[in-house]
Image (cartoon, grey):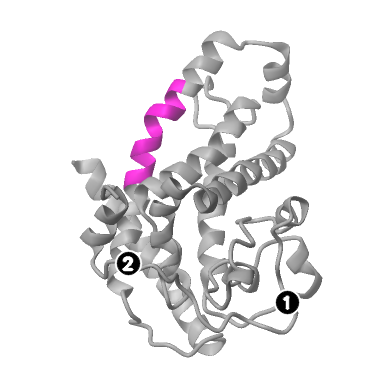
Amino acid sequence: MQQYIVDILRLSIWLVLLMAFFIPIERLFSGHKQKILRNEFFIDLAYYFINSLLPKLLLVIPISLLAYFLHSFLQSDFYIWMANMPVKRRLLLTLVVGEFGTYWGHRWSHEVPFLWRFHSIHHSATEMDWLVNTRAHPLDMFFTRMCGLIPIYLLGLAQPSANEVDMVPVFYTLFGTVWSFVIHANVCWRFGFLEKIISTPAFHHWHHTNDSPEYIDKNYAAIFPWMDKIFGSFYLPKNRWPEKYGIDAPTSNTLVGQLLQPLEVK
């Protein structure tokens, strides 16, 4: 219980810092005019705490089992070589490998009907800002994170047998979390050629568009848009932004309703 209290206090401090940064930025450079306390703001605020705690707990068992398996049965020269790789190189490879796994986990969440039932909660937001990043069913977030972490551990980029905390997966998770707030932000910034190298708000906003069926199911990458280039799902016009967001299917307007809706028998 004491650890949960510490975690909630830590998350509260981070929330204040995030609000202090993003709210003024979105006021000054907004892409769409909307209120700070927009529709369902407080539901997404609840998701901030839920998804900062619950998916991490759900990941403990599968990642621990995977780490045990690798440590017990796959002691090989390859894993020794990966463990001795310079940290900077391992970090870069971790970002690429994790992005590959996350890309396909995210794409499957759109293409597999059962997974979409959970992921659609994230896409039901009709107004975009930094806090929409946290608007997700915890089982959906668990699945996507697991898809990113499994190849990192399988390739030995994370060191489960170390006697101290391996900072590589910690950095990967932290960077991905922070950057996800950035790409959901309601800002009108464009970054020229950099938009082909790293994901931006414009890139990710088109992932959330509900303008037309021809624009949906694009831009799955969270960090590297060239991943979408490789797999044929890239879309980013130069001088346009989506006019509307959300999905056509009805979604509950309460937190409990959204958590239970994907679990309903259909």
Q: Would you say residue 257 sits in the magenta stretch? A: no
User: Residue at (51%, 81%) from the top-left corner?
Assistant: 244
Q: Residue 54 sits in which quadrant? A: top left
Residue position marked by numbered label 2 in the rendering: 251
At x 30%, y 53%, the residue is 50
Estimate how packed mark 1 is, as few (under 14), some (14 to 19) or many (20 or more) residues with alpha carbons within 10 Å: few
Nearer to me, 57 or 163: 57
Residue occupying the point 73% across, 76% down: 237
Magenta segment range?
54-65
Q: In this view, does 182 lie above or below 31?
A: above
Quadrant of the image containing the N terminus = top left
Q: Which residue is drawn at 39% across and 57% down?
A: 136
Q: From what the image shows, is residue 69 above or below residue 207?
A: above
Compared with 36, 47 (above or below) is above
Residue type, mark 1 in image: Pro
> In the rendered structure, which disc, 2 or 1, sits on the residue that comes first in sequence?
1
19 lies left or right of 2 = right
Name the residue furthest left: 1
